[in-house]
Structure formats: structure tokens, C-alpha cells
Image (cartoon, grey):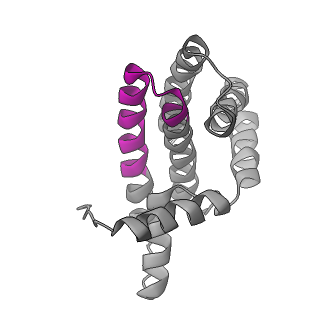
Amino acid sequence: MEAISVILPQKLGLKLREKAKKMGYLPEELGVELLSRSLNEELDPEGLVEHYQSLSEKYLGEARELLKKGDLVQASEKFWGATALTIKMLAAKRGLKLDEHGSLWAFVSTLSRTSGDEELVRFFGEVNALHRNFYENEMDKDAVEIIARDVEKLIEKMRRIS
């Protein structure tokens, strides 16, 4: 799948980020959703899988760089985003679309139960601590680094399940 970048005027970019935050989306994810609606062009399941996978890889790379630079707040959110998108990718492969935070938890719990791998739930709980850190800025670098390693493990487990 060929990705196309779109450069938004600052005002629209800020509005998109604000709206995405309120709705529990990542900005790029909401942008694609809004664009597909306005063009009356729904992504097929395969397109959705590729979209989620591409964004997940992008966010994971950005998270690693932000962590190296010491930007713990943004790194936390990017690690969260990479994980959420990996989970959405796996769900899309199964014909499901997860739109709410609770649906991510339900899907991870189901995967944990069916695979017998309790670490999926444990690691996802840690990822949620990073998501909270984005809003609260309460974690130090050591804590973010430790959880970031578990994020990597969780994403790898999710990719193997698919």
C-alpha cells in the first residue's frame, strides 16, 4: 500500500489533534477516518490492516527517538499509539473494528484468554500507564524505559498472533 502524506495548515492540524484527543483517536487515524467518510470511500479490511500496521511502525520508531531525546511525555503517547494500532490491526485482520478504549481492553482480554498468554493483559496494563503519563507527566525516565521494553514485547507478541 502506497502511503501519501498530506500537509495541513497549522490551524487545521491543531484542530485535528484536539478533536482526535477528545475522541480517543490518534491524529492520523482520525484524519483517515474523516477523509474516507467525506469521500464516501470506506477502507476495505485489507486496507485498514495496512493502514494500522504502517502507522504503528511509524509511531514505534518515533517513540524510540523521542525516548532517546528524553521527551517522556511524547514518547509515552507514541508507544501507546503504536500498541493501540497494532491491536486494531490484529482486530481488523479478524474483521473487527475497534473504536473505543474499552473495546481495545476487551479484545486484548479475549486474545489473552484464547492464547493462554496472560502477559498480553499485563503488558497492556503497563501501556495504559504510558497513555496516562501523556496526560499526567508523572513517570521518570527509568519507568518509561522499562515499560517501553514491555511495549516492544507486547507488539511482537501481537504480530506473532496474527
Q: Nearer the viewer, residue 127 or 87?
A: 127
Quick check: 158 left or right of 12? right
Using the rendered view, name the quadrant where residue 144 is placed: top right
Q: Nearer the viewer, residue 6 or 33?
A: 6
From the viewer's perspective, is residue 90 above or below residue 121?
Answer: below
From the viewer's perspective, is residue 52 above or below residue 160?
Answer: below
Whether residue 138 is in magenta: the answer is no
Q: Nearer the viewer, residue 10 or 80?
A: 10
For image coordinates 68% across by 25% down, the residue present is: 138
Q: Quadrant of the N terminus?
A: bottom left
User: Magenta region, mostly helix, strand or loop?
Assistant: helix
Specify whether residue 101 is in view: yes
Percent x, y of residue 35: 43, 78
Total numbered circles: 0
Question: Which residue in the rendered view is the most extreme toward the top?
Answer: 142
From the viewer's perspective, is residue 54 above or below residue 76?
Answer: below
Q: What span is in magenta?
A: 53-76
Percent x, y of residue 111: 68, 40
Using the rendered view, name the quadrant where residue 97 is placed: bottom right
For image coordinates 47% across by 37% down, the residue present is: 159
Percent x, y of residue 16: 49, 66
Specify whether residue 99 is in view: no
For image coordinates 65% across by 63% down, the residue present is: 23
